[in-house]
Image (cartoon, rainbow, N blue to C red):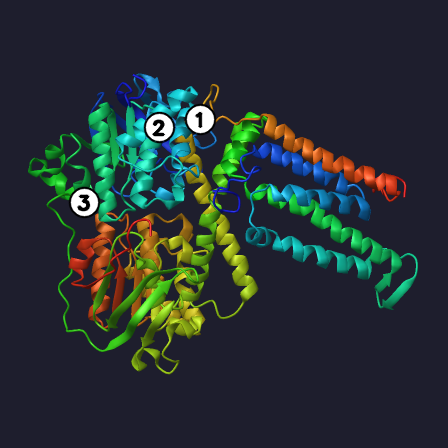
Amino acid sequence: MTGGVLGAPAAVEARGWGWRHASRRAWALTGVEFRIEPGERVLLLGASGAGKSTLLQGLAGVLGGDDEGESVGELLLDGTPATASRGRAGLVLQDPDSQVILARVGDDVAFGCENLGVARPEIWSRVRAALDAVGLDVPLDRPTKALSGGQKQRLALAGALAMRPGLLLLDEPTANLDPDGVVEVREAVGRVLDLTGATLVVVEHRVDVWLPLVDRVIVLGPAGVLADGAPDDVLGDRAGAGRTRLAEAGVWVPGIPPASPPPPARVPGETLLRAHDLAVERVRGVPVADGIDLTVAAGEALAVVGPNGAGKSTLGLTIAGLLPPAAGELRASDALADGVGPSPVRWRSRELLTRIGTVFQDPEHQLLAGTVREELEVGPRALGLDAAVTASRVDELLERLRLAPLARANPYTLSGGEKRRLTVAAALATAPRVLVLDEPTFGQDARTWAELVALLARLRDDGAAIVTITHDEAVVAALHARRFALPGREAGS
Amino acid sequence: MTLFDARARTGAVAAINPVAKLAASALIAVPLILTLDVVSAAVALLLECVLFLFAGLGWREFWLRTWPVWLAAPLTAVTIALYGETSGEVYAEWFVVRISEGSLMLAGATFVRVLAIALPSVVLFVTVDPTDLADGLAQIVRLPARFVLGALAGMRMVGLFLDDWRALELARRARGVADRGRLRRFAGMAFALLVLSIRRGAKLATAMEARGFGAPGARTWARESRFGRREWVLIAVGAAISAIAIGAAVLAGTWNFILGPS
């Protein structure tokens, strides 16, 4: 049928498959062995660096040729090598921004069909059917950059769907979304699967999001498949010790929440920052939130919550003394200012270091040095601390944040969790009295999550003020944080 | 979306295929680049003014879009007046500056020329949507799809680069290194931006490949790029402006071909 979204469900088979990136010595995966029947829905798990994304890209046939890396064994879709099966698999990636291809919604969905040589009239009927299936009810000429994160992910799903794939591959499709976006995307995927019967392989740390949808779980380990079976057998009570092992490897196993730190040891201390009728903006003349009244106190965690686009990050950067307020005021108490004036945005860059530290959402924005050790020395050096003090501080942080074995590694080569720990450590190196963090737990596995939360709780109890911007209700609860909700604006205004 | 990120417009020129706009701008610009006289440029500029009336651009927007041209033209002219080739009577002289009859003539010609070349290009391209241009270049000029679509998708990333740049700037302030060493910091940020953009590019390439980009077999086009009478009319107008301008210059005896004998 022309307007439908049907492609015959695909069978997937891995026979002793493995892959090594051209620039690495170690194999990303080896000895992967499984068979997925047409129409099965599989959740693919594994610790950070287990090669889950690599496997998905292999199945999508986009790993590249011999100059990209080396492979062994076979990866088959319906008995044909995955690399020769373009269009049989549709892939949706984690980052909403880097998979929007064209400027208008309709064109973006049509892109895959064009590449596969579908005739023009059929392209547009497929585009409409795909947008219907994912529930993205916007005009075809809507600019893609005007979409929210959840909408962008559904757009990517529609783009994959319009190719009528027999296999849907989702690589952490909800890791960057707020809770509403997560539900939006999960429901769209469910609808699409019910409609097409396509085979599904989804990678995601947050198991609970996808458990209602999948009927099989495969766990990847260093030497191939660690566990494979029905969700209850792999993750449920029947799994026994395997369950704990998975949790220790960083998988969010339902029923085994990561350890939470104890509640605050003391009541909050003096107020360090006070916002009164504050409006914040990133671009001059375009305020994104206003009328904000809040206080930041020593020994207390403050969680700034609210939907995507509510202005949380902009508020965080303003509190951090990096952006000037659009209106109203942000005042530092005398105790925090310590003689450099009440307005943080007027402080010199060096004066911020001991007063307010910031951990950005994207670690790569704040990496400055060639090695992990030098990265940690940046702040102390800017303060003019002597070499011995610097070295002892850096050594202590390297140990505390499990970075010591990586001291000489290039920060850019670290994994996502390691980069996050590094940027937190770099902010702590100058012992700021206020620490502002933007989505510190985004996309982190359970182990890194628990470490970060424990670290922040300890800082809080040592008398620092923690301001964290977060979608993650578990973080708010674990830190016993005071909530500050930004309401967000009406869509389209 | 257009190249200048404004709303789609409805003037007679706005709906014309971007390839025709490209061709018309080139037809006007190339002969003017090849001569250095005031008559051809002035005639061309006069005729272009008629074209602008149909471009579907309000006055406010016209000035908003073209002000850099109005700034660049006199600056170029002043430079040439001060340092241009000396001939005829010398009016003033100071160090390497020498204002002469010849350099003033040249300055006037350059002023008009910059306007005559730049204004039609800006005005025609204000209404160009990059997607339409890519469609035209691939379907009508038959440039390779890989190249055209790669460039189109890459262009969408420019907005992300601006966001990245701002974040890099703020992050350096947060790390305590923004008080001095401006030049070094700029170089560091430029390098960081390069790394970030290569990563984004690689991710985008994966996303495009996953959607069958570069797959063997013929590609189809969801949007047909039409090239009909309107397009030929615009090209003819461009050619006519060019021909009349050159004709006038030759008749007036001012035609001055830069590649020919002087």
What's the amino acid at mark 1?
Ala
Relative vertical location of residue A3 with respect to residue A435 in this rendering, above or below: above
What's the amino acid at mark 3?
Trp
- In depth, the one of A171 and B74 nearer the eye is B74
In the picture of the structure, the residue carrying the numbered disc 1 is B222
Distance between the Cα atoms at labels 2 and 3?
36 Å
Q: Is residue A385 visible?
A: no
Callout 1–callout 3 Cβ contact below 8 Å: no
In the picture of the structure, the residue carrying the numbered disc 2 is A127
Distance between the Cα atoms at labels 1 and 3?
43 Å
The outermost residue toward the right is B88
Q: What residue do we see at 52% from left, 54% from top?
A: B190
**Mark 2 residue crowding within 10 angstroms, few (<14) / some (14–19) / many (20+):** many
- In depth, the one of A475 and A197 nearer the eye is A197
Disc 2: which chain?
A: A
Distance between the Cα atoms at labels 1 and 2?
10 Å
Disc 1: which chain?
A: B
